[in-house]
Image: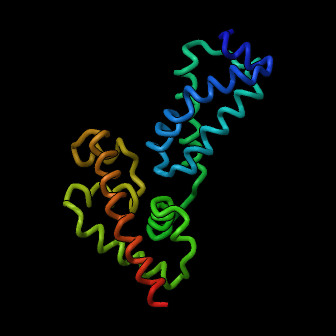
Amino acid sequence: MNLVLKEISKKNEKVFKIFFDKHYKDLVVYANTYLFDKDSSEDVVQDIFIYIWENAGKLKIESSLKGYLYAMVRNKCLNFLKSIKITDSYELLEFNINLITEHVFNSTSKEEKKIVYHQILKIVDTLPEKMQQVVRLKFMHNYKYSEIATELNISVNTVKTQLKRAKVKIIEMVTAILILLQINQ
């Protein structure tokens, strides 16, 4: 058994804290590449550390502990994404915009959501052509990164980069729209 896990199984809080501090931030960043939501990413990683704290003595790790952690994060993220059953484009886009704009979008009325939804579609239309395609395939058609990459003949890293850039632009524009809606009330 790994020395760190052995100490954690003995409930050695000092070793656990060092272990946690060493890996937490990088694992959250990794989880966020799947979920595009910092809060959800933090929850996933915290759940994994809780699991390790509670089950360290039972874990049988064949490879490195770090590799095991990353595999746990990936699997937990994928399970989280599978657990979200959204059936139509509007719901899928609303869900993803909720993630993008965090809790701000939740505080708006149904009428405001429709306005924001249509404004987001207009924002997407203003993005560079490749970025538009990536955003539409991801958020409106629920394609996976690899499917988008294959469809557009680009790398998965390009897909992720395009989505991150689009996310920043959409956040800026949606925030401005929400501020205008609040001012006009």
The x, y position of residue 155, in whole percent, is 26, 39
Specify whether residue 172 is in view.
yes
Side of 164 relative to 127 (left or right): right
Location of residue 22 with respect to 61 vertically, above or below: below
Percent position of residue 153, x then y: 21, 43
Task: Residue 78 in the image: state x and y as whole percent.
Answer: 54, 41
Which residue lies at the image location 40% right of the left edge and 59% below the top edge? 139
Residue 146 higher or lower than 52, as above or below: below
The picture quadrant where one finds residue 97 is bottom left
Q: Residue 121, position in %: x, y?
A: 33, 72
Task: Identify the residue at horizontal 29%, vertical 67% (top origin).
Answer: 124
How many numbered marks are there? 0
Q: Residue furthest left?
A: 129
Q: Nearer the viewer, residue 61 or 19?
A: 19
Given residues 60 and 2, the one toward you in this image is: 2
Q: Which quarter of the image is occupied by the N terminus?
A: top right
Tell me, yes or no, if residue 74 can be seen here. Answer: no
